[in-house]
Amino acid sequence: MGKKDDIKQVDAIAREFRMSPELRDDFGTFLEEEKRKGYGGTGNNRGDFTYQELRQKAKEFLEDINYDS
């Protein structure tokens, strides 16, 4: 069985923003925390993020850790 579509999108965003594997893992944790806090996306009823929302979240995540891409 292949990767779930939401994971594929997060991986694509990580590549787009040139995240290291460690940073990609941290980004995934960040997204799950955002969902838990009630800041989930509009992709479905589970709060998954659309691609555009993921791009915005990546920018927020990288700004929060003062990372320049």
Image: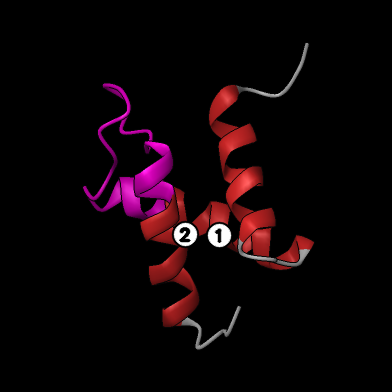
Q: Secondary structure at mark 1?
A: helix
Q: Which residues are magenta?
A: 33-54
30 relative to 44, above or below: below
Report the magenta stretch's main SS.
loop
Residue drawn 26% across and 21% down? 45
Mark 1 → mark 2, Cα distance in angstroms: 5 Å
Say whether residue 41 is magenta: yes
- Decide: marks 1, 2 in contact (CB < 8 A)? yes
20 relative to 7, above or below: below
**Horizontal and vertical percent position of residue 31:** 44, 52
Residue drawn 21% across and 47% down? 38
Instruction: List the residue tagged with mark 1.
Output: 27
Say whether residue 25 is magenta: no
The 10 Å Cα crowd at callout 2, few under 14, some 14 to 19, many 20 or more, is some
Mark identifier at residue 30: 2
3 relative to 40, above or below: above
Quadrant of the rendered structure where residue 5 is?
top right
Residue drawn 58% across and 51% down? 13
**Extreme residue in the bottom direction:** 66
